[in-house]
Image (tube, grey):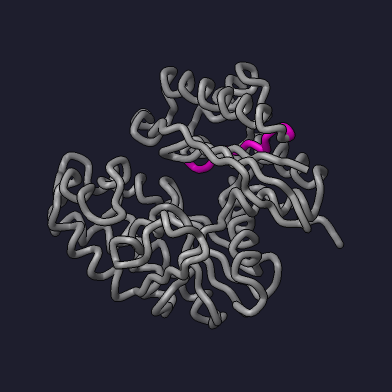
Amino acid sequence: MRMSVVDVGSNTVRLVVADVEGGLPLPVHTTKWKLRLSQQVDADGRLNDESVKQLVVAVAAAGKTAQRWGATAPLAFATAVVRNAPNRLEVLRTIRDGTGVKICTLPGELEAELTFLGARRWMGWQAGPLALFDIGGGSLEVAFGRGRLPDFVASLPLGANRLTREFFEGTDPPSARSVKALRRKVRHQLRDAAARIRWEGPHTAVATSRTFQQLARLSGAAPGRQGPFVPRDLACSDLRGCIDTLAALPAAERAELPGISGPRASQSLAGAIVGHTVMKLTGIETATVCPWAIREGVLLRYIEDGAVWWTANAERSDDPMPAGGKPLRIATPTA
């Protein structure tokens, strides 16, 4: 069976086509479209007409590409940049009508659960009690668990792009005062989740996302061209050094550093501050950089729990926020 997944993130739309063999997704084709949606949102977080048009074109191309590769209809979802937009439902309807691809948003807690599942499958049971950190453009996902799925998840508004816009807008490089202010906010937001991780005492910590991958490369990890099976670790002390290096440079010069790409150069400092703070507060000295994350988690959950699970959660995720403003709970099927 050949499946596909489409992930609409803050910077790119990514397509993964995978063959399902032995219950595992084996990638056969990946491609991406660089849209940089996070740079096109209005002050209130709305996606403007031009960005929606670009989304329609990219998602349509992803759907056609998946079809050419003989995959089933994509499991398509959008992360924080669309999930947090006031015009989210309008954006999703426009994409569906213009592409025929059934795209949805997922609650941040569900993103954390799916990313944890991908990391657990990659790391294996020998990893033991597992802590997960994932820095996106709009949010930070944290999870902990001893089994297949996490026992604890949190989604916090600490995405690298979001914080860059909030604290470093118009200053390049940023001032020492703004860096200090950002550190203070991140510590405050992470206090409760970090205390839970410390209390649980994980045996292994994993870091996913392009932000962590690029920071690991900056810290001396092997480049991506060497493949996913080369071990890559990221130490808390290395992130401290990354902060000092990145804070001293404007974005254009950061992009010349090992691992730091041009599109992500401006938000790399915020990402390093979030990564360092979450590791320091949780007492994690070293994290393994894991190549599997939410896209693999979506495929795995679909393989293991079936279409009913995906349909139920995808449809519920786009209902209006229930009374009280609490996120919808995740529907976990029984064994």
Look at the image and tell me whether residue 326 can be seen. no
Q: Is residue 54 above or below residue 34?
A: above
Is residue 316 shown left or right of residue 267? right
Residue 146 locus on image (x, y percent): 66, 75
Residue 126 locus on image (x, y percent): 63, 79
Image-quadrant location for residue 92: top right
Q: Residue furthest right?
A: 335
**Which quarter of the image is occupied by the N terminus?**
top right
Is residue 329 shown left or right of residue 165? right
Frontmost residue, 146 versus 257: 257
Residue 282 locus on image (x, y percent): 44, 76
Look at the image and tell me whether residue 1 can be seen. yes
Frontmost residue, 328 versus 162: 162
Residue in the image at 44% along x and 72% along y: 287
Image-quadrant location for residue 247: bottom left
**Which quarter of the image is occupied by the C terminus?**
bottom right
Magenta residues span 72-80
Residue in the image at 56% along x and 24% along y: 61
Q: How many marks?
A: 0
Frontmost residue, 192 versus 82: 82
Q: Is residue 284 above or below residue 294?
A: below
- Residue 71 lies within the magenta run: no
Residue in the image at 73% along x and 41% along y: 2
Residue 90 locus on image (x, y percent): 57, 23
Is residue 205 shown left or right of residue 281? right
- Residue 74 lies within the magenta run: yes
Residue in the image at 51% along x and 21% along y: 57
